Amino acid sequence: MKLIGVIAEFNPFHNGHAYLIEEARRIVSEKTGEDTYVVVCMSGNYVQRGSLAIIDKYARAKSALCSADIIFEMPVIWATSDAGRFAACGVDMLSRLSCDYLAFGFEAGNDAAAVSAELISAADTLCDEPEDYKTILAQYLSSGQAYPLARMNALKEYTGSDCRYISTSNNILALEYLISVKKSDSAIKPLFIPRQGAAYDCPEMCGNFSSATAIREKMTASGITNISDSIKASADLIESNMPSHSYTAIEKYLSAPAVEDSDILPYIVSRLKTSGRDELSQVYGMNGEILNRLMKVSYPTDYASLKDHMKTRNLTMTRICRLLLHTALDIKEPEDSFTGTEYANLLAMRRTASKVLEEISVKSDLTVINKKSAYKAESEASQISWSVDCRTTDIYNQIVFDKTGIILPSELRSNIVIL
């Protein structure tokens, strides 16, 4: 038996995700001759770019069971972190859940071997950080460039490569996975799966392999309560880009207004108006410059204007969105850089994977949470993390109810989805 790990958001689950999982199964089965099971570490109700998931985590986990076997939730603190910490948490969890392989998509272009080789080489450089590279990086940072751009420019200069293969969102994340595997000295084996269909952030629907970005845009446009011919056409287009089981699992969301990032604005304003400077300074991702700009916001405001107000040369918009989300959710800066988690919150599983779950529970040093109300954190860090998971689930559920009328249970009353 071989376990294939996947780090994902499934926001929402679509044909490209199904392809990645099935292709990973095929490759591992042919290589080993053994049965395969797919274990997913998935973002919950909030995703890495600092946004609200368009569909709740249990519905998204259920939608993935057409392809995956077991879905665990990545703790919110790390699921809404920068790409490095996001990848580190995913790799750590899947390694400790006994996964043999880590499967991920990448933009292969016309030469998958060349792209994967460049990603591996870049990961070696960024993991080891030679002194010459660090000197170059420091120069770019001192010029005012945001860290992601400075790192890319330093890598180009150090290697003498144009790094064109690692400039896309998918490949940047693949690079972070490789760095995390190397840094953690994990035995998990990377499995490169060439991406099919539209690019990661392509906003247009493209046949039956559209990006999650395009599907979310279509859901936002079609999510109104009166079903017209145009709305039905949009729903049909969305359905064609998902396995039938996945579409059915999220169908209740398609006839209601879609959850959007701007729905978090009242929570942001409330925190800014009721918290002192010292308290706000502890928010995850906050620094003096950002806090000064936040304290000068003019009210009333809207979410787009707030983001624009916060934008500076050395701050990416994604970092701003994460900071605003952490402000709204009152997520404090972790005391340490990522050092591992102690639990794995089970969201969904196939009945046929019960023996796998039993084996994981015995072999892993992670506590598998299958009865939410019974979990007792083993350390202060885990207690804080689990408290954040539960509290932010309640906030997300309230936003969904306010927007759609859909009632979702609190984390402690949620049941694992079993099919």
Image (cartoon, rainbow, N blue to C red):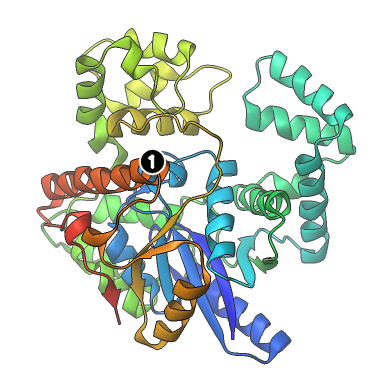
**Label 1: how many Cα within 10 Å (few below 14, some 14–19, many 20+):** few
Q: How many marks?
A: 1
Q: Considering the image in quadrants, where does the N terminus appear?
A: bottom right
Q: Viewer-proximal residue, 378 or 232?
A: 378
Q: Quadrant of residue 64?
A: bottom left
Q: Which residue is pictured at 29% across the width and 57% down the height?
A: 55
Q: Which residue is mark 1?
A: 380
Disc 1 is placed on an element classified as helix
Residue 234 visible within the image: no
188 displayed left or right of 221: right
117 displayed left or right of 169: right
Q: Which residue is pictured at 41% across the width and 21% down the height?
A: 308
Residue 341 coordinates in the image, percent (x, y): 48, 51
30 displayed left or right of 38: right
Q: Quadrant of residue 24?
A: bottom right
393 w.r.t. 284: above or below: below
80 w.r.t. 416: above or below: above
Residue 184 coordinates in the image, percent (x, y): 68, 52
322 w.r.t. 9: above or below: above
137 displayed left or right of 216: right
Q: Which residue is pictured at 30% across the width and 70% down the height?
A: 236
